[in-house]
Amino acid sequence: MSEPTDWNQPPRVRVRPPGPRSRRLSARLAGVESRNVTYLADDFPIFWEKSRGSNVWDADGNRYVDLSGGFGVAVAGHRNRSVMAAIRRQIGRLPHGMGDVHPPSLKVRLLEELAAVSPIADPRIVLACSGAEAVEVALKTARLATGKPGVAAFTGGYHGLTYGALAATDRDLFRAPFADQLNPHVLRVPYPHPYRPASELGREDVGAAALSRFEALLDTAEGASVGAVIVEPIQGRGGDVVPPRGFLSGLAALCRSRGLLLIADEIYTGLGRTGRWWACEHESVTPDLVCVGKALSGTLPIAACIGSQEAMDAWPESGGEAIHTSTFLGNPLACAAGIASLREIRKRGLVERAAGEGERWMAELSRTLARHASAGDVRGRGLMIGIDLVKEADTRQPDAELARHVVSEGLRRGWILLAGGPDGNVISLSPPLTLSRALMDRATALLDDLIGEVAR
Ligand SMILES: Cc1ncc(COP(=O)(O)O)c(C=O)c1O
């Protein structure tokens, strides 16, 4: 595929970010938004005004390169022309429908297109308005299909913050204030993190150790209530963790032998990000249910839970009241965006591009950053890459302070970066899959510079 040349401009910083307009907006926001939502500080945030391709512009006219892809959403580039044209066409015809009563005709097309790329043959699908809602649908489906209330979920997992999803998410910060209202039947299982293995897994063959630990947990009283397993094939917000080869296929085999439903949360990884349409494909795994979001429309809020017909038929046939739905289900603008976005991914060969360019960039990052003891691990797949920053190579102690420096100083130079992982020490790269090679190389030099600035 030819290199996309459009809208891959280098940063252009005119006013030191955050500039005066962003600062004024921060002050106004503090007067109207709940204080929990937007992090406001001297060096954060900038307010976005415009976007195109790999670039975004802020309220002060600075141009940035977005290495986060707007939380991994903008796979075909921000404000992708074809997707925008589809939304414009649709807005002139039908901007809202009655999703589960008198649906917009586009809902049928989006579901057909999604079914055509689904990793599950002849699937049945439920649309949702956010990733977390798609997870809710998966968890409800599992409850109906298995008759069991329990769910196994992994350490470091992130599945969203609504109550059902939050029970499966593993981060105390999010869970602790609501712990007494969460599904008590969640079995927490260690995820095989090759760089930071849980002590109970040892250091050798963490994938196999995680599988035996899981099997042992299933044999406890707590394990008896488990009907389903929810897993990210590659953990995203948990710090871009790629489990050892064989883990996912082993997990799928275990689920089959124990009669458990396998839910793959591909909200971050799905639709090309990892160099395959689905991250499960790296191990030829076919889950029972798959959650997809972010890249589905590349722009508007829409997500889906895709399931085997057998699992999905556990839902009762609607007699006029769907037992899971919502006002904006199958919103026609989001459906139009979804159809156009799927077409762009296919037409521009973005899955293949993520595989090829991702591999090249990750090798380059590993080579360049090897000179910094604080760049403990560079890992990922496709264009989902994490740089694990540590205080010392030997102890692997997470260095969140260095990550904060990289994010904040990167912003000042015109690069949008995010720090992830439970300790906030992993620089997480999930750019548009259209990011040019030239910008990848500039980003490598930037990270080399920023990491090197803080001598340890
Ligand atoms: C793997 C995974 N699952 C679920 C979610 C939740 O999606 P949303 O934020 O759209 O609710 C996310 C969001 O980052 C995610 O990465």
Image (cartoon, rainbow, N blue to C red):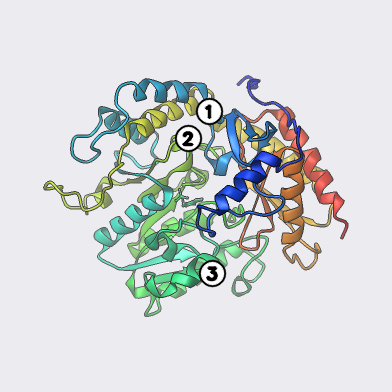
Point out residue 36 in the picture as x, y percentages from the top left corner: 53, 59
Separation of disc 3 and disc 1 at Cα? 35 Å
Using residue 398 as the reference point, say whether residue 233 is left or right of it: left
Separation of disc 2 and disc 1 at Cα? 8 Å
- Which of the two discs, 3 and 1, sits closer to the camera? 1
Q: Amino acid at mark 2?
A: Thr
Q: Is residue 429 visible?
A: no
User: Counting other residues with Cα less than 10 Å from the Cα at mark 2, is it few (<14), some (14-19), or many (20 or more)?
Assistant: many
The kind of secondary structure element at disc 2 is loop
Q: Which mark, residue 79?
A: 1
Q: Is mark 2 within 8 Å of ligand 1?
A: no
Q: Earlier in the sequence, mark 2 or mark 1?
A: 1
Using residue 454 as the reference point, say whether residue 441 is left or right of it: left
Count of labels in the image: 3
What residue sits right under mark 2 in the picture? 299
User: Counting other residues with Cα less than 10 Å from the Cα at mark 3, is it few (<14), some (14-19), or many (20 or more)?
Assistant: few
What residue sits right under mark 3 in the picture? 172
User: Counting other residues with Cα less than 10 Å from the Cα at mark 1, is it few (<14), some (14-19), or many (20 or more)?
Assistant: some
- Residue sitting farthest toward the right: 455
**Which quadrant of the figure has residue 354?**
top right
Q: Amino acid at mark 3?
A: Asp
Residue located 26% across and 34% down the image? 97
